[in-house]
Amino acid sequence: MQMPVHIVAALGIVENDQEEILIVKERRSDQWVFPGGQVEVGENLMDGLIREVKEESGIDVKVSHLTAIYSNTGTYKGHSGVKTVPTKVMFDYVCKPIGGELSSSDETSNSQWVKKNEVLDMVTSPALRTRFQAYLDFEGHVFYMDYVTQPEFKLKHKRTV
């Protein structure tokens, strides 16, 4: 039996004192997204998230609390030589900015603060819209959701844990 392989990732909903949310524009897709990404070997979730937010946006953050855990259980053809993208397990955290300055990176072409009520005007990915709505609906209980993104987004399961 082959051991299962999962990508583990963390995403930051970074909110400042003016009720603005940090978003970044991906170079690869030219879409606005929330900063975050894959946790590297030997790195814990929160350190990986802090590193990814800094790399993608220039902003230093403190992790506040977990809002949701997601499984993207769809597998599909990857890019950059990856034959099949495996199942992903993703953790969404609320973060607070503690320093740094907005910047772009090798992965992002722009980063900016957006009023909380305008985020969904800019973030178009159905999966990220669903995840932002979970952040908006958070009342102290962590959400768990299972979805697929290919060939189209489909939410398969949602509950609190």
Image (cartoon, rainbow, N blue to C red):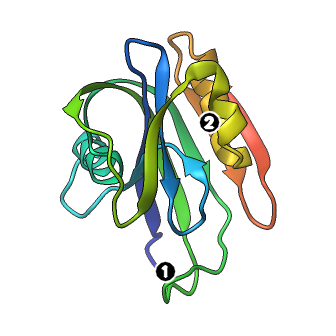
Mark 2, secondary structure of its residue = helix
Q: Which residue is mark 2?
A: 131
Q: Which residue is mark 1?
A: 1
Task: Please tell me which residue is depicted at 24% across the width and 49% down the height of the picture.
Answer: 51
| Residue 110 rendering spot, x and y as whole percentages | 45, 51
Mark 1, secondary structure of its residue = loop
Closest to the observer: 78 or 74? 78
Amino acid at the residue labelled 2: Arg
Task: Please tell me which residue is depicted at 40% across the width and 64% down the height of the picture.
Answer: 107
Look at the image and tell me in which quarter the C terminus lies.
Answer: top right
Task: Please tell me which residue is depicted at 35% across the width and 67% down the height of the picture.
Answer: 106
- Closest to the camera, between mark 1 and mark 2, is 2
Q: Earlier in the sequence, mark 1 or mark 2?
A: 1
Q: Quadrant of residue 159?
A: top right
| Image height of 81 relative to 136, above or below | below
Amino acid at the residue labelled 1: Met
Closest to the observer: 138 or 106? 106
